[in-house]
Image (spheres, helix red, strand yellow):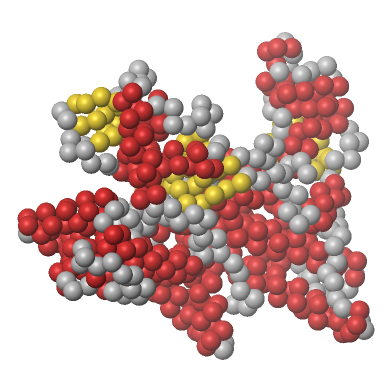
Amino acid sequence: MKKFLDLISREVSAAFEACGYEAAYGKTGISNRPDLCEYQCNGAMAAKKKYQKAPILIAKEVVEKLAGNPVFESVEAVNPGFINLRVSGSYLAGYLDQMAADPDLSVEKAEQPKTIIIDFGGANVAKPLHVGHLRSAIIGESVKRICRFAGHQVIGDVHLGDWGLQMGLIITEVRHRNPSLPYFDESFEGEYPEEAPFTISELEEIYPFASGKSKEDEAYKNEALEATAKLQDGERGYRALWQHILNVSIADLKKNYDNLNVEFDLWKKESDAQPFIPDMVEAMKRDGYAYEDQGALIVDIKEESDTKEVPPCMILKSDGAALYTTTDLATIIDRMQTYHPDEIIYVVDKRQEMHFTQVFRCARKTGLVNEDTELKFLGFGTMNGRDGKPFKTREGGVMRLERLIAEIDEEMYKKIMENHEADPEEARETAALVGLSAIKYGDLSNQASKDYVFDVDKFTSFEGNTGPYILYTIVRIKSILNKYRAQAAATQKPEDGVTLPREILAPASESEKALMLELAKLNSVIEQASEELAPHKICSFIYDLSNALNRFYHETKILACEDETQKCGWIALLDLTKRVLETGIDLLGFEAPERM
């Protein structure tokens, strides 16, 4: 179904054309003065120069042509040439009826669906997820869901860090602690144990210990470098141990991502890109793109339009070692060959923008992507504490994601138990849902590129622009609908069952019409959020919709209404509002409980 604003513009454009003016002048927007009108067209003023005519005269002609149009309740020409419009309540109700009848709420799908790969998560094996990983996971998951809902084929890839010196350090430290393990016996020819020789807790302790020791002990560092080289050369025992590291780490990562309601279609790793590197390097040399400079292999990527220096893209270091740049370029080759994406989106810290500028330019210059393949950098800002510095634990360390989620859940549990007499087990389940909404909405309601302050008290509040407030609104609607079902069941035979009414009526009050006008924006909001990769647009929409619903609720005696037809119309409107809000929070990556 067409966007509501497009339908309004179509009517006004037709009137312009009927008066002898170009239809394009009929483009209409939402009024920024809702006290005067709901929609406004400024095309008459834009047409002044071409038609050498006073804008107010053009506006009056168009208004006269629109007289009697059933789409509008009122149309008015206002000096110096504005056209102010109020939409007909019955037309608005008809539009919402069509929305309600469609499982996808009549959201227009992309005319030309794309295959999109979203690279997000940014986790490393053998390291716990901490708050620094939060934004990539939350933003990437939401962008993935929004683009899918808009009709695109979207593939989410975690792109794990599993290669390089960190693996050599772990292998070295495991060898120091357990030298008798078969992985270090070059003469061992049997099957290696299925069980890993360490737990995730041990693994997470091993890496920082080994990393710290390598900075103080040169011999230890050289041993780790040698282990890294052996692993990358395919040493059998080291490869088996590396696979254990992966298995243990990925199992723990999946558990943590599940707690965030974040899913990946691909669990690709840096190591998956390694086989593509030799041919890529040779091709760049052969085609004259890559050359040696002080022993390193580089590709120039400067452009005449650059206003600041963009360094060359280094492909190999002077010792022949690959870099993150190398791996990212090789990963693009893998993705292009396997999935043929129209678009690849990287959801990463905005401080990595120069790195991805180099990667994107090098990929285009050397022909790794098609000319029409889009490479997008969605850089996010820092999550800070109230002191304005990166968010940390009370002790000053980097906070693990598990701990952050547990603290938010505990805060929500206390609030639920203070406000209601609730079953403790149910309250724990509800607290987890509401806590996740606090974390995700608190992040996503900010524009991704901006830094923001993670304020626990604010984000867990049931009032204001917060996740818990949105969930409270949904739960309020659910409560009304359940009471309506109970009322209806009392007057019907049990076998008949109770179905909610579907027909939405023309609004009976200003607050009801305001709610209906908010609902009619859904199609446009989804399109904007998808095109701009902007989950905060969804947040703004569902916050405004929640406010409109609560104003209507406080002004209207819904269940006590004696006019059954009117009551049924309101119930149908509430049901649609619930569905739209639930769609919104699903696109943000969380869900609502039945009770709060």
Q: Please tell me which residue is depicted at 89% across the width and 36% down the height of the picture.
A: 69
Q: Is residue 469 above or below residue 34?
A: below
Q: Position of residue 267 (x, y in %)?
A: 45, 56
Residue depicted at 81% across the width and 77% down the height:
485
Residue 27 in which image quadrant = top right
How many numbered marks are there? 0
Answer with left or right where residue 481 lies relative to residue 180: right
Residue 87: image location, x then y, percent: 80, 43
Instruction: Judge by depth and name the residue closer to the eye, 510 or 90.
Output: 90
Residue 80 point in image, percent of width and height:
69, 25
Of residues 3 and 379, the one drawn nearer to the viewer in this rendering: 379
Position of residue 445 in the picture relative to residue 169 (left or right): right
Residue 449 appears at what percent x and percent y?
Answer: 42, 45
**Quarter-of-image position of residue 195:** bottom left
**Quarter of the figure with the C terminus:** bottom right
Residue 508 seen in the figure: yes
The answer to which of 477 and 219 lies nearer the viewer is 219
Residue, x 76% and y 41% (percent of image)? 2
Residue 76, visible in the rendered structure: no
Quadrant where the N terminus sits is top right
Which residue is found at the position 29% from the left and 59% from the top?
236
Q: Is residue 403 above or below residue 417?
A: above
Q: Quadrant of residue 341?
A: top right
| 501 relative position to 552: left or right | right
